[in-house]
Amino acid sequence: MERLAQTERTTLKRLPTRAEYDRAPVYEILDEAFICHVGFVVDGQPFVIPTGYARMGDCLYLHGSAASRMLRALGQGIEVCVTVTLLDGLVLARSAFHHSVNYRSVVVFGRATVVEETEEKMEALRAFTEHVVPGRWAEVRWPNESEMKATTVLALPLVEASAKIRTGPPIDDEEDHEINVWAGVLPLRLVADDAIKDDRLRSGISLPDYVRQYRRPADHRKEAQADVVGDEVCL
């Protein structure tokens, strides 16, 4: 998979060694996370709105009510900045100054366009559902005509984007390694609890396997990275 073109806006100034410009890690982060934050300015007032999203190929899709101020503004072609962050661990150093977190983040710049074509719009809505719960779209009722009219879908090309990633242990000052305090990484991951059925669920409807066995895309990778021994957690 090719690299994204570096631009003035996507080139990292702070800790540039943590930058990723290949599409593969950028897409992996986008495919694992649930929520993005959409930054834009209207009449001199900045807004940052959290919302769901989905990726299809080299495009990010946003959706919501046709009455949404954010979607109406973005649909006019104004500049937008979309950010996504995954928190992977708490980095506990020997000094307060060097405490940190392990994370993976993506920043996307560009201009979004309204998806008008019905087939692409429906495919985007399918992607939103499958991004959250793979396998769900095949079972649920699809949006009807009135629901489609009440929904706006925007497409944001993934042309100007980059990732920033921090992994590994704390980076203490050399003299602080003699301090008698525990240091290391406490890994974090998103885990689903047992499903809670709807009170009005009809009898005889069993829990789908895709709910019972629900996992986020990177669960297995994170489990392989984490080594937990007793009350010590290290990465």
Image: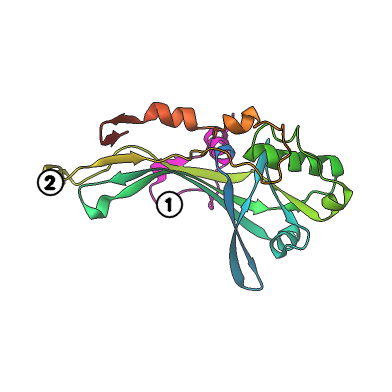
Residue flagged by tag 1: what amino acid is it?
Answer: Lys
Image location (x, y in percent) of residue 233: 29, 35
Binning the other alpha carbons within 10 Å of mark 1 as few (below 14), some (14 to 19) or many (20 upward) gives few
Secondary element at image label 1: loop
Q: Is residue 88 left or right of residue 4?
A: left
Q: Quadrant of the C terminus?
A: top left
The answer to which of 202 and 226 lies nearer the viewer is 202
Secondary element at image label 2: loop
Question: Can you identify the residue that label 1 sits on?
Answer: 13
Q: Is residue 84 above or below residue 141?
A: below
Question: Can you identify the residue that label 2 sits on?
Answer: 179
Q: Going from the N terminus, do you reach mark 1 or mark 2 first?
A: 1
Image depth: mark 1 or mark 2 in front: 2
Residue flagged by tag 2: what amino acid is it?
Answer: Ile
Residue found 23% across the figure and 42% down from its top: 183
Residue 105 can be seen in this image: yes
Taking the magenta stretch, the answer to whether it contains residue 27 is: yes
